[in-house]
Amino acid sequence: MKVQGSISYSPQNPWLFPSSIKQNILFGQPYDAIKYKAILEACALAFDLDVLAIGDETILNDCGINLSKGQQARINIARALYKESDIYIFDDSLSSLDNHVKTYVFQNCIQNYLKDKLIILSTHDNRFVKYADNVTIMCNGTVKYSGKPIDMPPKLTETLENLNKNSSESDEITNENPDEIDEDLPPYEDTKLIEKTCSSAKANIYHETLQTGAIRWSDYKKYFMFGGGFMIFNVIIVLSILIEALSGLYEKLLSKWVSMEEKMNLNSTSESFLNMSLDTFTVLPVASGNFSLNYPLQTTPMESFNISEENFANLDTYGRNFYIHTYSTLIMSVCILVFISHVIFFTFSLKISKNLHKSMISKVLGATMSFFDVNMSGNILNRFSKDLYAIDEWIPFIIYDVVNMMSMLAATCVLIATINKFFSAMTIILVLIFALACWYFIRPARALRRISSATRSPLVGHLNATLQGLITIRAYGTQRILINEYDKHQDHVLASSHLFEISIRCLAFSLHMLSASYIAVIILRFLIDDVESSSNVGLAITQSFVLSNFLDWGLRQWVMLESIMTSFQRSAEYTDIKQETQAGQSKQNWPSQGCIEFKNVSLTYEKYSETVLRNLTFTIKPREKIGVVGRTGAGKSSLIVSLFRLYETEGDILIDDVNIKTLPLRSLRNQVALIPQDPVLFTGSVRSNIDPLEKYSDSDIWLALSAVNLNSAIKNLDEDINESGLTHSIGQRQLFCLARAIVRNTKIIILDEATANMDEETDRFIHKKIKEISEQCTTITVAHRLHTVMECDRVMVMDNGKIVEFGAPHVLLQNNNSLFYKMVHHQDSS
């Protein structure tokens, strides 16, 4: 395939990155005010931006979740238009728009603004076929027809016409102003909420509240409690003290051994000297005749020391054997204890890490929705990546070094006290100076570490958003823009990390200089006053080197421990997250009917302090089919949220006369099936996606897949599904969700605009299947296309969090002044 010319691309799944709305549209292109304004008008975005306090400078959250689906889609279309290209590709970009907005955007963007450009439009809306120069009709991956619309075979033409007849969408494209009737554009009540969810132009959506002050004892206690408590840690401390005591003992033993060897060498030297003297004084009288030998000079060297040669040899052999065996035993004992200590401690540390991670996962999964309202993906991923890495890879080693340093310090001070008082005094002064230096450095190091951890959240969030939008980024050839943005985030991380490393290096240099001064004073002391034995001098100098090095390393590790423990603080915050209420007792054979009753139910989102449901009171009979309609922000989705207790509500919600607040959440949510607007598939197998709790047999799963016509597309239940099921179309993902609901066979099924992004044929197929499986179920359908609720028993019309109309659709349509009549009239007229 060969492509000539530049390409602009608008995907089916809108992609927005964490930045301003304006930057999402410009996407690296130079700003042209006239062109920019024209595109906003063509994409029906002018009204949306006018209601925001800072307009297009408003910062979007992760993937633009603070905007409606239609707004996200129109920003993506505006981005495609703003880039001056030869070819424009729209991959079903209009599917998430309401009919009249879709009509407006098609005419103003595609027919007018891009009238001189090559446009490739993928769509399931057959109204647009006759406006194309060439049409390609595909089915199951094969091309059924490619050519001009007027040359299309009669059979295909008839099929498309039948689809149009069954659709609520009219055949004509009109130039109606969407600001007047656009259901997707929020009214004033809704824009207030959107305005609150959007951040200001200078806001950091990944902002974290930094803790201050020292690491508290309670933090260390909490860390060890994840391993089971202090008992094992106390054993490790005892082993460390024992190791250092034995180490000091063999150091002292080595000093004694050296002293014994000195005495033996002195005896050996004395023997040689006296033998030489005896020979000399024996010869002299013969030569001079003036001297005679007295008794002492006739004594042998061994006799002068009162030790026989045989006893001396025995003492030499016995002493060396004693020292060799004792020294070897001590060394082996220390090695064995060190090995045992390492095994116990790092097993203990591994248990801490596992339990901490398990607790974090459990608490995040059980957190209230308000937690996810204020914590972006970058914040959460940062805690589970870099912070847990620091806890796994750094804290165990640092704690072990600090414990060993404290034990070594105690043992060395005891050993020093047996050598020289001056040495002891200098050691105490050194320890005090080292402690003062660490206390001075520990505060800025700890603060810099916290800043470094916090600055990593935007980096992780940016990387996550980039991976989600790789197709769009590569289609626009804007890799360099995202790389530059990544570099900016990386610069912030490196700047704080570099300052942290500098502070540690500065501390190390200061401690090295203090150590050198200490050793110099000790050596000069022994050079000036020669009052010690050579063994004690050697032991003192050796211990001064060991002590200074261990103090240097140990206290630096202490500073590092205080700094790295900030990562544990941050991670431990996720173990104290407010949890959803789990109290209650499951009811057997509940629900049996599917009756739903709301009594004065109100819902307020904590983050925005905005009441979205206002004193709702109504009853849905068993097996009744209810349609819920209303403008964006009317409270339709909030009604569903309250049924699942995703947010706590005021008032009572009863299902089969049981207040759902008295039920465990798992029991409640297992008994209500949801088919959402955005279908979700998880990484794993087909089986794990249909039956994640492994409750049903393979035959039950195959029956559910067959019911939604997915059995032909699935080879086996162990077939892999990649991340988010991106290899499957939105329609197929929605069918997976439907199969998930079928296999559970619940008494209540909720469709939250489940077919908003589907073609008419798939839409009708899903509703047909739902009708088949829901004959004995209560069904609530949140409608995007109003024709989908025409077969419902009753329609609930919501506005501003209240029920304004509730009755049979044909009854509501008979009232020309009803809101439902006006909504249907506007949609039909478009």
Image (cartoon, rainbow, N blue to C red):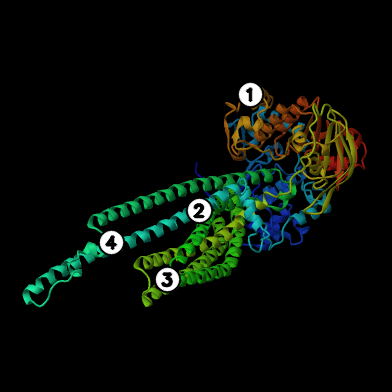
- Secondary structure beneath dot 4 equals helix
For disc 3, the marked residue is 519
Q: In the image, residue 43 lies at what x, y percent? A: 71, 52
The answer to whether mark 3 and mark 2 are in CB contact below 8 A is: no
Disc number for residue 698: 1
Q: Earlier in the sequence, mark 1 or mark 3?
A: 3
The amino acid at mark 4 is Met
- Secondary structure beneath dot 3 equals helix
Q: In the image, residue 461 lies at what x, y percent? A: 61, 53
Q: Is residue 566 visible?
A: yes
Q: Earlier in the sequence, mark 3 or mark 2?
A: 2
Within 10 Å of disc 1 (Cα), the crowding (few <14, some 14-19, many 20+) is: some
Q: Earlier in the sequence, mark 4 or mark 1?
A: 4
Disc 4 versus disc 3: distance between alpha carbons? 31 Å
The amino acid at mark 3 is Ile
Is residue 72 shown left or right of residue 230?
A: right
Q: Earlier in the sequence, mark 4 or mark 3?
A: 4
For disc 2, the marked residue is 240
Task: Please identify, in this view, whether the residue under mark 2 or under mark 1 is nearer the observer.
Answer: 2
Disc 3 versus disc 2: distance between alpha carbons? 26 Å
For disc 4, the marked residue is 264
- Secondary structure beneath dot 2 equals helix
Q: Earlier in the sequence, mark 4 or mark 2?
A: 2
The amino acid at mark 2 is Ser
